[in-house]
Image (cartoon, rainbow, N blue to C red):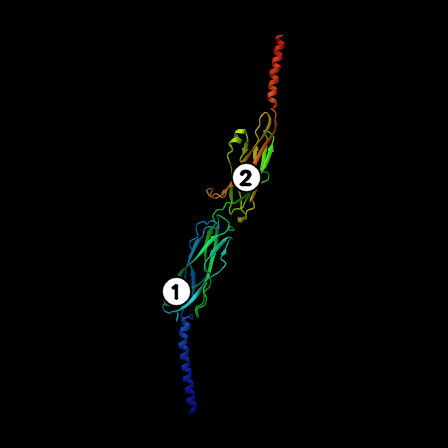
Amino acid sequence: MKTLKLVQNLAMVALVATMALSAFAVPATAQGGTGVPPASFTLKTATGTGSPQKVDIDQTELSIPWTYTFGNAATPLVGAVQTSTTLTWVAPVECNKPGVVVLGSFSELIPLGQGAATTGKVEQTSKFIVKVTEEAPGETTITCTMKAHMGAVGAIPQTSDSNVPFSVVAAYRGILSTSLENAIGEAGPQAPITYNIRVDNLGNSESNVNFNLVENKAAADSGWQPVIPSSFVLETAKKGGSATSRVVPFQIATPHKNGWNNQETTFQLKITPSSQKDTANVGQEYTVTMLARVRGIYVPGPEPLLVFAAVLGTALVSRRLRQ
């Protein structure tokens, strides 16, 4: 009899324990067991960075909508009235080219209030500021990727990373370095003076290098004859180019007059870069100044002497014939 009663008591304890375990199993299942769909986090299309940006000046707002789903109305998140989770963005942002800076909060606290706990979904938009620096190549698309995940909530685990691309274009930035190998030139009358000008492209894109001579009416009236260099294209190291520098000859023909010549004047040559893709985009203008001198005696060529000798010879022959 005692044995039978002991067996009955053990059976009662087992039944109570089973009921207790069943009572605790419901919340656990609702928080991430088989009764709740797996949590998901999705980044949607990013907007706001389509236009070209001036280097170190412009900044644009990058907007990224997202959706976090962690349940549904049939299986709400139990006790989530004051629950929150953390949205974490992966830093640094990955780009296929350098020079892009993304500013903003890379860790956001996301509250999951009663409404979110009931629907099992949160939809919001995260915003960042995007800038380009002088390291960015110009006039070419730079592709970057934003990655993020949502942290764990109770028994619901952390989501995997979701990613979304966005693109940035750095506007044309025309910067040159100019130098003269010889700033002073001298030659005799009716002779050339050559100045060698070195031009380096320090900008962020391919540049047309254009030359324009500052007017010098007095020099033109005196007979100086400058020859303006032709335009050419320089590559940029920021796009992997190698032809980033060139030495350009600028030639001036000196004036002349019979006898002693002794004059000097100055010439100013303006050098301006412009975009090879859009010539309306012009960079910084540079000016180089050169001093030119002409010194020496100019002796007329043989032609006048020959004419004089021919005339004199004709006169002598005619005189003898008359005699």
In the image, what residue type sits under mark 2?
Answer: Val
In the image, 213 versus 267, the foreground residue is 267
Q: Residue 130 appears at what percent x and percent y?
A: 46, 54
Residue 302 sits in quarter: top right
Q: Residue 173 appears at what percent x and percent y?
A: 49, 46
Please give the residue where the numbered disc 2 appears in the rendered image. Answer: 288
In the image, 270 versus 279, the foreground residue is 270
Position of 114 with respect to 238 (left or right) is left
**Sooner in the amino-acid sequence: mark 1 or mark 2:** 1
What is the secondary structure assignment of the residue under circle 2? strand
Residue 308 sits in quarter: top right
Say above or below: 149 vs 290: below
In the image, what residue type sits under mark 1?
Answer: Lys
Say above or below: 87 vs 285: below
What is the secondary structure assignment of the residue under circle 1? strand
Please give the residue where the numbered disc 1 appears in the rendered image. Answer: 121
10 Å crowding of disc 1: few (<14), some (14-19), many (20+): some
- Residue 38 visible to the viewer: no
